[in-house]
Each structure stands twice: as structure tokens, then as C-alpha cells.
Amino acid sequence: MKIADIASATGVHPSTVSRVLRADPRGRISDSVAKRVREAAKTMGYRRDVAAASLRTGSTQSIGVIVHDIEDPVYPPILRGIEKRLLERGFMTVVGNTGYDIQAEAEMFEQMATRMVDGVILGTTRLRDRVVELALELGVPLVSVLRNTERLECSAVVNDCAAGMRELVDVVVAHGHRDIAVIAAPQDLSTARDRLRGLQEGLAAHGLDLPPDRLVVVDRMDLASGRAAASALFDRQRRPPQVIMAVNDLVAIGAIQACRERGLSVPGDISITGYNDIPLVDMIDPPLTTMAMNLSEIGRRSADRLLEQLSFPEAKPQLTRVMPKLQLRASLAKVGG
């Protein structure tokens, strides 16, 4: 089966068939024509010779995705969004897992570049990031997902963490809480920095501040870190805070575990909030108040940004923010309620 056969069957020029089947965005091809060509190719049993095509075009039709921890519930919805959009355009996705190892991130990127992926979507980005520097040095198209660099050297698609945390503070204060403790994350990550900044801005808007003894910064955003951080907060003062606002849901669940270890009821004695709205946090006891990120949409948009960069490599980096949505649940109680 050849491209010419599909062109004859659909009544379009072979070059049009070629552009549709290799997901080339240049030129204007209507959705109806593209759909007709793809359906004909599927019906007629066309299979693209990727090896031969890569020799002609220098493209492997593959995109690398690098993440901290594939078991982190944040990543699967993002990956589904990325894979769905890329597959629509004829690209395969290659995922690498670094385990929070900075050296592994750089090595994994170099391995992907050596294997000639067409571009990389980076989910491990720090404010100052060696992988981003390598991408610029090697000329590898790169888009950051969830986080951005300090000077925006590459396009990024992120959750609007500062706005989300300000909204969450508004709700916490509206419930009567004034003694607020915070579990934050390393400030070399834009998400962690923006969430802490948004939280502090939200407190200031209500005439409140964040005392140093009510702030703990964790190295990793997981259950164990949340449990240890909450325990550290309890050890600092005899009186527990009215509420703990955690940097993400896993940390928040760890804080709930620490409360139970100390005989504290959530939300009877202390309220807990998270961020991300990972799967099943609405089913734990108590269901967790959090901010829901549209992770699939963030993944889709990051794929779109990379595809645009492949077509227009000289375009300036763009920062795209996706708004979160409040999920008010039982882990946040009204004071005296």
C-alpha cells in the first residue's frame, strides 16, 4: 500500500496525504480532508515505514517525557493528555523516570537526545535547570510541564499555583481559622515557590502572617515527608495549629496520619488542606479539601506547545497558566462548628 493509492482513493494530492499521515502542520488541510485520509489509510491497511521516513526527514516521530516519579499520582493524567494529543499527530511517547536524581535527569535527557527524539517534555524542571541548558546547547526542542524556569528559557505549561493558593487561603480564613501552619516544598521548584508566595499573599490580604515556627519545608512531597513535617510542627508548640495547609495532597495525607498518631481528630481538633486533587482524596477519611488541577489539559497543552515549537523553532518561549478549581470537603471545618 502506497501513499499514491490513498491519494487516488480519497481524491487528494499525494503530498496532502503525506502531510496528513506524518502529522505535518504546515499548510492548510481541512479537518474533513484529514479525517477522510486517515480513515482511508486505516481501511486500506497503510503502515508508515518509520525507519525509512526518519532517514528522509530526520524525524523519528517520537517525543521524550521526563518525570520525577512515575508513581506520583500527578503524572499519569498529564501523561495521558500528552500521549493522546501526540498520538493524534502521529508521535509516540517515550517516558523516563528519574527518582528525583538531578544527575539522572541530565543523563536521561542526553540519552533521549542521542536516540534522536524530536523533542522533550520536561516534568522535573527547576528554577535553574541543567536539562534546559543542555536542550538549548544541543538545539533539542523542549517544553516544561507543571513547572517553569526563573527566566523562562523554554515554553512552559503550568497550574496557576499562586492564584489557587490565594483562593484556598480565602476559604480557610472564611472558616474562621487564624492560627495557620504550612508545610511547603523546596523553593528551587516554581510550583513550590508560587504556592508559598500565593499563600503568604493570601494571608497578608487578611492581615495575617506566617510565623517561622508554623512553617516546615520538606525535601520531598510524599506521605513520609508530610507525616514527619506535621510531627515537627506539633513538637514546636504545645498547642497545635488550627489548620495545616500542605503543599500537595500526599503531604496532606501524611499530615493526617501524624495527627492520628498524636490522638488529634481531623477535622475535629485540626483541619488539613492539600493541593492537586489526586485520585481518591475525595474517598479518604476525612475527604480532603484541595485545589484541583486540570492535569489532562495541562498535558495536552504542553504537547501542543512542543508541536508548535517543532513547526516554528524561532518562536519565543511562552508561559501558559491553567486555573485550578476549589474542592471543598470535610477535612476543613469551621472554627467552633
Image (tube, rainbow, N blue to C red):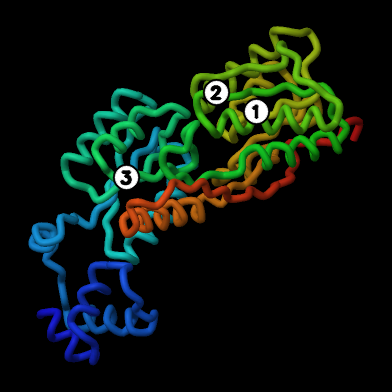
* Residue bearing the label numbered 3: 120
Whichever of labels 3 and 2 marks the residue nearer the N terminus, that label is 3
Marks 3/2 in contact by CB < 8 Å: the verdict is no
Numbered-mark total: 3
Mark 3 → mark 2, Cα distance in angstroms: 24 Å
Assign the N terminus to one quadrant of the image: bottom left
Mark sitting earlier along the chain (2/1)? 2
Give the vertical position of 82 relative to 126 (above or below): below
Q: Please report the residue visible at 39 percent of the width from the left and 61 percent of the height from the top.
A: 85
On the question of residue 28 being in view, the answer is yes
Pinpoint residue 57: horizontal percent, then vertical percent.
15, 60
Q: Residue at x 33, y 35 (%)?
A: 97
Residue type (three-letter) at the residue carrying disc 3 = Val
Which residue does the image show at 79% across and 21% down from the upper left? 209
Residue under numbered circle 1:
196
Q: Which mark is residue 187?
A: 2
Asked whether the residues under the numbered discs 2 and 1 touch, taking CB atoms below 8 Å apart as contact, a structural biologist would say yes
